[in-house]
């Protein structure tokens, strides 16, 4: 279960305030073709916080292209991908 997560509205504000240190896209465990986006706030030892939807504790996308479109829409200019 995901404890702390960030909604897209909050993410957009944090990106505009340059508070996002890193963005990482990874495969969702147990899902063959689902991807999730997590962000790191603060220093290099801060943990990654996943992005959630309004209804689900974890927002997922079916493709990296879809994650890229979302990231661009909220102002994220780049992310790393973990396979």
Image (spheres, grey):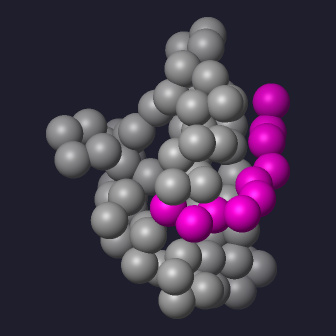
Q: Provide residue 44's location: percent of width, then percent of height.
A: 76, 80
The residue at the point 51 percent across, 28 percent down is 61
Q: Provide residue 67's location: percent of width, then percent of height.
A: 59, 38
Answer above or below: position of 34 versus 51.
above
Answer above or below: position of 31 versus 60.
above
Would you say residue 80 sits in the magenta stretch?
A: yes
Q: Provide residue 79's location: percent of width, then percent of height.
A: 75, 55
The residue at the point 19 percent across, 39 percent down is 55
Q: Is residue 32 visible?
A: yes
Query: Does residue 47 appear left or right of residue 6 in this picture?
Result: right
Task: Name the magenta segment's main secondary structure.
Answer: loop
The residue at the point 69 percent across, 77 percent down is 21
Q: Quadrant of the N terminus?
A: top left
Q: Is residue 41 visible?
A: no
Give the mark count: 0
Stretch in magenta: 74-83
Would you say residue 35 sits in the magenta stretch?
A: no
Residue 28: quadrant of the picture: top right
Q: Quadrant of the C terminus?
A: top right
Answer above or below: position of 48 versus 55.
below
Q: Provide residue 62's location: percent of width, then percent of height.
A: 54, 20
Q: Residue furthest top?
A: 32
The residue at the point 36 percent across, 48 percent down is 52
């Amino acid at each position: 279960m995901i404890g702390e997560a960030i909604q897209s509205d909050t993410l957009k504000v944090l990106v505009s305030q340059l508070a996002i240190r890193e963005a990482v896209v990874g495969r969702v465990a147990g899902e063959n073709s689902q991807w999730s986006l997590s962000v790191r706030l603060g220093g290099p030892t801060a943990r990654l916080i996943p992005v959630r939807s309004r209804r689900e504790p974890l927002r997922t996308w079916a493709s990296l292209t879809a994650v890229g479109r979302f990231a661009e829409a909220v102002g994220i200019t780049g992310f790393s991908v973990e396979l």
